Amino acid sequence: MSPTQWDLPPELCCRPMAFVALTGLDVVYNAIHRAIWDAFCANRRADRVPISFKVLPGDHEYPKCRTKRTSYEWYIPKGILKTGWMNKHLNLVPALVVLFYELDWDEPQWKEKQSECATKVEIVRTSLQGRNTKVAVVLIQKKTPLPPGEDVVASERAAALCNACDLSGKSLFVLPHTDHLVGYIIRLENAFYEHAQTYYYTEIRRVKSHKEFLNKTTHQLLFVRHQFKIAFFSELKQDTQNALKYYRTAYTLVHELRAHETNMLEIKTMAGFINYKICRLCFQHNTPLDAIAQFRKHIDLCKKKIGSAELAFEHTAWMSKQFQSFGDLFDEAIKLGLTAIQTQNPGFYYQQGAYYAQERKQQAAHLCGHEPSVGYPAPDPLETPTGALDFYGQRAWRQGHQSIDPPDPEKEKNGILALQVKEREVPHSELIIALLSNAVAQFKKYKCPRMKSHLMVQMGEEYYHAKDYTKALKLLDYVMCDYRTERWWTLLTSILGTALKCSYLMAQVKDYLTYAMELVGRASTLRDDQKSRIEKNLIKVLMNEVPEAEPDCDASAVKAAHSLWSDRVALAGSNAFTIEVQHYVPFIQCKAKFLSPSFHVDNPVELHVYLRADCPHPVRFSKLCVSLSNQEYNQYCVVEGPGLEPSAQENMCLIPGKTRKYAFKFVAQTEDVGKKIEITGVDLMLGNESGRCVFLNWRGGGGDAASTHEALQATRSFKRRGRLPEQHVAWETVSIQASTMIISRVPRMSVQLHHEPPALNNEIYCMKVTIQSQEDALVRDVKLTAGLKPGQDANLTQTTHVTLTSSEMSEDSHPALLPDISVGDLQPGQRVEKPLYIRCLSTGSRIFLFHVAYAVTTTVENKEILCKCHKDETVTIETVIPFEVAVKFVSTKFEHLDRVYVDIPFLLMTDILSASPWPVHLISSQLQLAPTMAALDQPQSQVERVVLETGECASECFSLRCPPILNGTSSVASGQYVISWKRKSTCEDVPVVHTVVNLPHVLVETIPLYVHAELPSFGRVRESLPVKYHIHNRTSLVQDVEMSVEPSDAFMFSGLKQVRLRILPGAEQEMLYNFYPLMAGYQSLPSLNINLLRFPGVSSQLLRRCLPSRIFVKPQGRQDEASIAAA
C-alpha cells in the first residue's frame, strides 16, 4: 500500500462537468478543424457553460453497456461503488456525441455527401451500444447562412439530412467558418449543454426506477449506491441543490448499514467520499456553518469505527486524511472569498490531522514491530488481477465478500501482515511535518502566535525523530525566543532539552554550549542532578574533551555523534566562541553600572560590574572585560587570571547564588567633556585558550531575556529584605546604569551684572559685567560671550544690537551676541569689569546670556589635567517705550481739523507723554517738514532741556501752511518729528538717543475764496471797533460774491449791510466796518455771510471758518482812570 492510499480519488475531488465527445475533427492536419477545436477549449472564461470536451475518432469504442437487469430478486451486491464508475461518466461515457462534417447547402454532390454523413452517424450510434447518449451533427460551411425561412433549398436539404441520419431538427447545427467563429461556438455550446442536461436527467430517471425492485434486507448497499449515483448525475447536470439532498440521503443510508470488521473500511471509505461531497457543496453554496456541522457529525459517527485492532493505524490514517481534506476544502473556499476568523480557520483541521498522523505513527511502531525474520508474505495478498480494486474500501484478498467472517483465515492473516509490513515503509514524519506546516501557515495568517509556536515545536520534535537535526534545531531555536519573552519556563526547558540533544548529535559546539548554559541556569526547571550532569558536560567541552551522551538518544546516532565530537576535539583551531546572551537566559547573570549618571572631569569615573552564577556548582572564569564607547578606557576595566594574587584568583570563582562585585576606576579625558560614555558590552571568558574558551557577551550594561521582567517584579515586590553584611550585595537591589555624562569642572568664578532695568526702547542700555576669579591657581584664557541668548524668536535677534563701546552704536547694525571677548588671564581673587551697550529696537522680554569660559590646571589621581570650565549667567530684561507722541492738526482757532486748505494757516500740535519708570531728559526737538508743507515762521524747540517724570507731558505748537499742490493730490506727507533724549541717570556718559516720529499724512483741499479779518485784540464798550475783511479770489475765474452782515445784539455797526461784488482772478477786495460794542464780556461778532454764485456748493460756513466769531469787550472806564491813562 503506497503512502497515497488514503488520498481521495481525483475524480471525486474535481468539479463534475458534462462530458461531450467531438468526432469528425482532424485537429492535427486540418487548420479549420484546429481553429474550431481551439475555440472550444482555449481560454474558457468562467461565464461559459461547464462542459468537458474531448476529440475522439468516429469509430471510437465506448465502454460497453451492461445488460439491463429486469429483477433484483436473487441479486446480492458485492460492494457499494465500483472504483471506475465516476471516471467512466466523467471521461469515458459522453452525454452527447457531436459529429462534425464539412457540407455546404449548395454542394454539387449532395446525395453522396448526405449518404456519407448518415453512415458516420450510424457508426457512432453502433459504437455507443445502446446507451442513452445523444447524437448531434454540425455542418461546417464556408458561407454565412441566410436568415431562417429565406433559403428554401437549405430548409429542404436540412429536412432531408435529418431523415437520412434519423435526427431531430434540434440535433442538426450549422457552423459557418467566418470571422465570428467564437460567437457561433458559444451558441453551439449552449445547445450542447441542453442536450447533455436531457441525457443526465434521463440517467437520473433510470437509476430512480430501480428503487421499486430493491428490498432493505439484501439490497442495503444498493440504496447507498443509487443515491450516490443520482447525486453525481445531478452534479453533472449542475443541479447542486438536488445533488446535496441526495448526498445527504446517501450519507444517512451508509451509516444504517450493518457494520462489522470485514466491511468497516468500505463503510468508512464511502462515508468519507460522501462527506467530502457534502462539505464541498456547502462551501460552494456559501453555507460554511453547514459544512462545519456536517464534518463534526461525520467525525463523531466514524471516530469509534476502528475496525480490526491489528490494523488500528489504518483508522488513524483515515481520520488524519478526513481532517486534511476538510482543511483543504476550507482553505479553497477562503481563496474564493469566504471570510474565516481566528477561532475557526483551516489551521485547526490541519492540526487535528497532524495529531492523528502522530497517533498513526505510534500505533504503527507498536503493531508493526515484527522480528527481522518476519518478511513480506508470498504470494502478495495485496495484488489483484487488474492491479486495482473493484470496489472502493475493500480488501484485495477478499473482494466482493460481504459476510461477517472472513472466507479464509490464513489469507486474512497474510493480508494483515502485508499491510503491517507496508506500513513500516510509510514516511510518517514527512506526513506529520507536512500537516503541521500547513497548520502553522494558517495560524500565522490569522495571527495566532501561540498556536503557531506550539505547532512549530511539534514540527521540530518530529524532525528530531526523523533524524533531520538541522531543521529541528532551526525550528526550535525560532520558537524559543517567544517562550523566553513570555516566560514559559517549563516549556522552554523541554524544548531546550530537545535542542541540546540535536546539537550533541550533530556535534555543534557553540549550540551545545549555548543550550547547556541555559539548561543549568535559573530559567531551567530541571532537577539539580540533571543540571549537575549538564554542567559537568559543559566543563568537559570547555576543557576540549568529548561530553557524555544525552539520555534517550538513538544508539546509532550517539555512536556517530561520538565520532564527530572526537574530530572536533582533534581540531587545533576554531576553539573560541562568542555567545550573545541578551536573547538567552544563561547560568551567569551580569549587571554593570556607573556609580553616578554624571561625573565632573576632575573626578575619577567609577564603574562596578556585578556577576552571579545560578548553576549547581561553582564556576571559574578566566577574564572579565568591559567595553566602553571610548575604547581608550577599556584598558582600565579588565580582570585577568594570570599573574594575580591568590586572593584575586579566588575572586574569579563564582559561588552559586552569591553576588560578586568588581570595581573599576579611570580618569576621563578633557576631550570627552559634554559627551556621554556608554558601556557597549561586558565580556566574560570561560575556559582557557589552551583548551576551548567561550566569551559570554552582554550588550550594554548587562541583562538577558529574563532580567527585564525580574527587575520589574523586584520594584513591585513588598518583600522585606534583611540587612546584609557590608561585603554582600542583594542582587535584586542592583540596577543597571549603562551610561554616564562627563561634565565640566565646577567653575569657581563670580559673574555679577550691574544695570538699571527696564531698558527703554531704542536707547543704548549700559550693562556692566564684573568677573572675579575664586580659583586657587592662575586662570588662563578667560573669554566672555555676551548678548542675546540663542534660541529665541528670530525677530528679537534682528532688533537687538550689542557692542562694547557706546560710540560704535551709531554706526551700522551690530550682532545680537558677541562671542569670545578676550578678558585675558586672572590671578586668584582678581576682578575685571566689562561694560556692554545694548540697543533694543522693539519692546518685550529678552533673555541675555553671559558665558565666561576659562582654563585651569588641576590634579586628579596624581595626574595633572587642564580643565576647561565655564560659568553661565542669564538675565531677563524687559524693554518698554520711553514715551508716547501724539500729533494733531488744529485751526488757528484751535479747532480740530480733519483736512487743511491750500495756503490757509493751521497749527501742528505735538504731545510727548512719558511712559518710562526713569526720568527722561529731553535734549531738544526738531521739526523736519516735507516739501509739501511750509512753516509760517522758523520752528524752534519748545521742550529743550525739559526733564519728564513718569506720566508727565510736554507739548509743542507749530504754525504751518500747505502750498499749492500739483496733480490734484488729496493726501500729502507732513514730515518727521525728531526728539533727542536720554535717560536721566547717574552715569554721565549715557549717549543721546534720537527718536524719529513720522508725522501723519493730511488731506488737502483747495478753497475758491479765502476770507480773513483784521481787528484789534479787544474792544471797549461804546468805543468804535474798526474791522477790515480781506476777500481773496484764489481761482482763475471772475467771482460774483454776495456779502451780508447779520446784526448782533451786542454790537451796532456801520458799513454795507448787503453788497454784491465782482472780484477778478487773483485779486483781493477789502471791506471796512465799524463795530460799536454795547455790552462788555466775551461777545459774538456780527456774522458775515458770503455766497459764491459760481460755486453754489461752497457753503458760507466753510468760507468764514477762518474768521473770528467772538471778541472780548472791556467795560467802559471811569473818567479819572482815563485821565490817569492819558497822563
Image: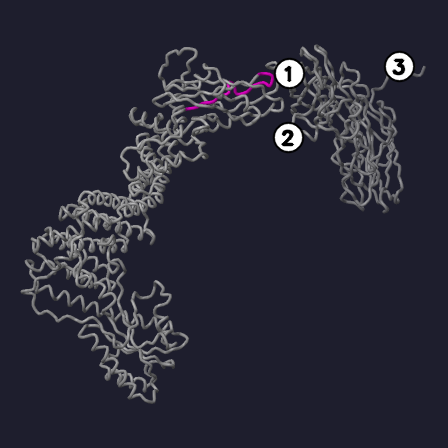
Distance in Å between CA atoms under marks 3 and 1: 106 Å
User: Does 595 appear in magenta?
Assistant: yes
Residue 1121: numbered disc = 3
955 sits left or right of 693 in the view: right
Q: Residue furthest front?
A: 570
Of the image marks 2 and 1, the number of the one nearer the N terminus: 2
The vertical placement of 949 against 98, above or below, is above
Asked whether the viewer can see residue 1001, the reply is yes
**Residue 191 quadrant:** bottom left
In this picture, which residue range is highlighted in magenta? Answer: 589-603
Front of the two marks 2 and 1: 1
Of the image marks 3 and 1, the number of the one nearer the N terminus: 1
In what quadrant of the picture does the C terminus appear?
top right
Residue 864: numbered disc = 1
Task: Tell me where residue 628 appears, x and y as whole percent.
Answer: 53, 26
Q: Residues within 10 Å of mark 3 (few under 14, many from 20)?
A: few
Residue 156: numbered disc = none
Q: Residue at x 37, y 28 (%)?
A: 540
User: Of residues 606 and 963, which is closer to you in this image?
Assistant: 606
The vertical placement of 385 against 812, above or below, is below
Residue 793: numbered disc = 2
Task: Tell me where residue 479 appears, x and y as whole percent.
Answer: 36, 37
Q: Amino acid at mark 3?
A: Glu
Label 1 SS = strand
User: Does 217 appear in magenta?
Assistant: no
Distance in Å between CA atoms under marks 3 and 2: 77 Å
* Majority SS type along the magenta span: strand
